[in-house]
Image (tube, rainbow, N blue to C red):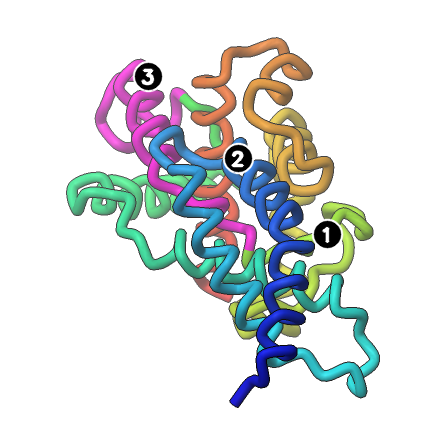
Amino acid sequence: MYTAQGKIHQQAQLDAYLPMVRRQALALQVRLPAGVDLDDLIQAGIVGLLEALGRYDASQGAQFSTFASQRVRGAMLDELRSRDWLPRSVRRQARALDEATRNLQQRLGRAPEEHEIAAELDIDLATYRLLLGDINNGQLMPFEELLAEGSEHRFVGKVSATPLAELIEGEKREALVAAIAELPEREKLLMALYYQEELNLKEIGAVLGVSESRVCQLHSQAVSRLRGALIEV
């Protein structure tokens, strides 16, 4: 049981780190679908901060600020992962897209063009791009759990251990790195800007000279290519 002094000390720490929670929530929000509420992220982050206050052990060597930051970010991502973003119909279409992309890659021996994927799905290019937008709107940074959360590593270099580390150990880690290297140059640049440089969609669009909606489409297409490359590993 906390003493009165203990409760005061915990409240002081909570107050001191609330600005960090808000900064992390804002940084995350700009990289998410438009419907994500900032207050929801902050509330999840506060839960993570409280957990950090209760579990921190200075004898483990990590500074509290580092430990708390990781717990806060993890709590926000857990909250987002718990939500069901995509309708079943769009999930089915996403699976069909992954399969079509993978089949074309195998047949052609290269990354398929947009019009080739659309033809494989038996839809026109405009409908295909709408589908990419629908899929992207439901994606929570699908490689947030696959790629290093920090920017200290090259995008196509080392992949950090994460809750989904079993997907990228050994051969699968090598397959992910190889699949990223095989992306078309524009998609490779997009993914590097998003996951390594942490630019938001508007900023990436300015770099690529395309609209935000087009960035969303290209992002979905790149993710589909990478899932297709990893599924058989």
Q: Is residue 151 left or right of residue 227?
A: right
Residue 17 x, y percent position in the rendering: 66, 55
* Frontmost residue, 184 versus 151: 151
Residue that carries the numbered disc 3 in the rendered image? 125
Residue that carries the numbered disc 2 in the rendered image? 31
Asked if residue 167 is positioned above or below residue 57 in the image, the reply reads above
Q: Residue furthest left?
A: 89
Segment tinted magenta in the rendering = 115-144
Q: Secondary structure at mark 2?
A: loop
Q: Amino acid at mark 1?
A: Gly
Residue that carries the numbered disc 1 in the rendered image? 150
Q: CA distance from mark 3 to mark 1?
A: 36 Å
Q: Secondary structure at mark 1?
A: loop
Q: Secondary structure at mark 3?
A: helix
Q: Amino acid at mark 3?
A: Leu
Q: Is residue 171 visible?
A: no
Q: Amino acid at mark 2?
A: Arg
Residue 71 x, y percent position in the rendering: 59, 65
Queried whether the magenta region covers residue 31, the answer comes back as: no
